[in-house]
Image (tube, grey):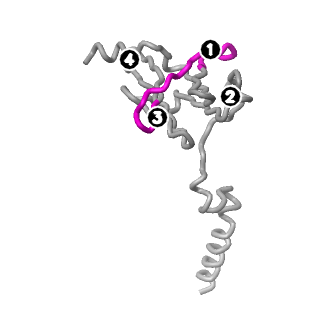
Amino acid sequence: MNVLKLFVLTLLIGCGLSSTVFAQGSVEGMGDFDMKVEDSNFPTPPNADFATAVVNYQLDYMGLKAGKNLLHIDRASGIKLFANYNSYTRKFNLTAQTRKGEDIEVKVEQSKEDPTCIYATVPPDWINVICTTRYIYSEDIKSQNSNKK
């Protein structure tokens, strides 16, 4: 009987300390759990001070699939950013669309600080920093895909 009491007491103490020991916090915060790479691992884009949002992507961790891949939805404007990937050439390009499906121009420039990163600006001032060593950015992916249809 004493062994059973000792076991239950140990179990209660263990459950009470588990959040402290494992540094997990409360379950209520699990909806806010965000797994991301530190911002210091990305170069600072030009005009970052004036941007409404700067979003960093590490495509190597995302694993692009052939075709259209949703990268991000800007909740305020409803604009969606897509990476169109050609698995044969290992190249991708970027497109953006409104909620109504209208295409929006994406201005892309190569980073001078880090050659593996590009800056993609979606008008008027949403800047995306996209870094990858596995994939190559190319603007002519649409023409390559349309030739195969």
Residue ID at (57%, 29%): 58
Percent x, y for residue 25? 66, 59
Q: Which residues are magenta?
A: 97-118
Residue under numbered circle 4: 142
- Which amino acid, mark 4? Lys
Magenta stretch encompasses residue 108: yes
Element assignment for label 3: loop
CA–CA distance between discs 1 and 3?
Answer: 30 Å
Q: Are marks 1 and 2 in contact (CB under 8 Å)?
A: no
Instruction: Return the residue at label 1.
Output: 115
Query: Which of labels 1 and 3 is toward the front?
Result: 3
Q: What residue did someone put label 3 on?
A: 98
Residue in front for this viewpoint, 19 or 31: 31
Is label 1 in contact with label 4 (beta carbons under 8 Å)? no
**Residue type highlighted by circle 2:** Asn
Instruction: Compare marks 2 and 4 and give the one earlier in the sequence.
Output: 2
Q: Which residue is mark 2?
A: 41
Task: Classify 10 Å Cα crowding around label 4: few (below 14), some (14-19), many (20 and above).
Answer: some
